[in-house]
Image: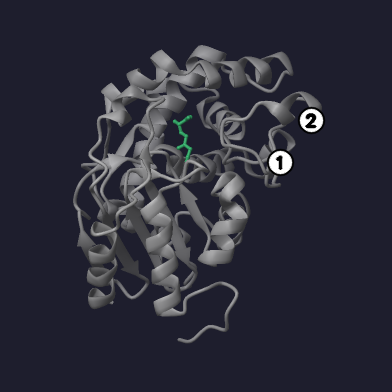
Amino acid sequence: MQDLLTEIAEVAKTSPDKGQVATYIPELAKIDPEQFGICVATSDGNVYSAGDAETPFSIQSVSKVFALALALGKVGDQLWRRVGREPSGLSFDSILLLERENGVPRNPFINAGALVTTDTYLSGYSPKEALGELLRFVRSAADDDSIHINEAVARSEIATGHRNFSLAHYLASCGNMNAGVDKVLGTYCHQCAVEMSCRQLALAGRFLVERDDMPGLVSKERRRRINALMMTCGHYDGSGDFAFRVGLPGKSGVGGGILAIAPGRASIAVWSPGLNQYGNSKLGTEAMEMFAQKTGWSVFGAPQF
Ligand code: DON
């Protein structure tokens, strides 16, 4: 495993096309695109890493996985009255389907759906308390109390977040927003501004690795369902392509991170800030494809324990 990760990091570092860093959040535009890290936390307790695996990055939409777990923990299946479970086939920040579908977002991983999950875990709490819950969840999953929120990134996104404000206002106009647009946006942008290294993210992702002898933060059934949504919706309009190329449930973020789960086997985190046309990490996707090919790990193959 260690040799494989070292090889993947070497291939990534020498790749001539590293994609484009996200610029619509000004703080993210400052990130050096030359960085690449990968880390694998296996279900038998081993951790392997290569490249810039200890460098913290903005997890952005990868946070939507933790937010979903938190929202489901709070209201259970009632969440599905407010958000769907279908891929949207559109970009992560699209508003197109909201009008046609009466303000019920297609899934919890596009921005509109994530605003609903944030509204759900925020409901009844102050933003500070809700973010405290989120951090508690992530820190406990990673077993690392140093995980924090980058305030400058959160403020940078709030200051330029016209698209997300419009999504939130549209949801509110349809009666699908309870805590108020400003509070939800503030909480959502802080949630997206959680920083983690590949090592921390791979460790945090272990709660989604289905294995009976691993203590779980969520039930087995919920884990399976979150993984299903990651597979079908975790990469937006690039979800089908990721499933085709990698064959593992994954969630991406515009910070360049990807969390992928090999059920029963491992949690894998990869990071490279340059993005492809779908807003997913370009080298991260290529690295995950190489990883899946070389290990043979895929949810579409027979298990080889
Ligand atoms: O809401 C946004 O636009 C960002 N905070 C997160 C978007 C994102 O990460 C999309 N992922 N690839």
Between residue 169 and residue 38, name the one nearer to us: 38
Residue, disc 2? 101
In the picture shown, does residue 281 fall above or below 30?
below
Tell whether 222 sits left or right of 213: right
Marked residue nearer the N-terminal end (1 or 2): 1
Residue 110, can we see it?
yes
Task: Give the percent coordinates (x, y) of residue 153.
Answer: 31, 26
Q: Is 263 above or below relative to 120?
A: below
* Mark 2 crowd level (few <14, some 14–19, many ≥20, 10 Å Cα): few
Does the residue tagged 1 have its C-beta within 8 Å of any atom of ligand 1?
A: no
Amino acid marked by disc 1: Gly
Disc 1 designates what residue?
Answer: 84
Residue 80 coordinates in the image, percent (x, y)? 70, 40
Determine whether 250 is above or below 92 in the image. Answer: below
Check whether the beta carbons of the residues at disc 1 and disc 2 lie within 8 A of each other.
yes
Q: Where is residue 272 drawn, in percent x and y?
A: 32, 49
Question: Is residue 47 in view?
Answer: no
* Secondary structure found at label 1: loop
Which residue type carries mark 2? Glu
Q: What residue is rendered at 49% in x and 46% in y?
A: 65
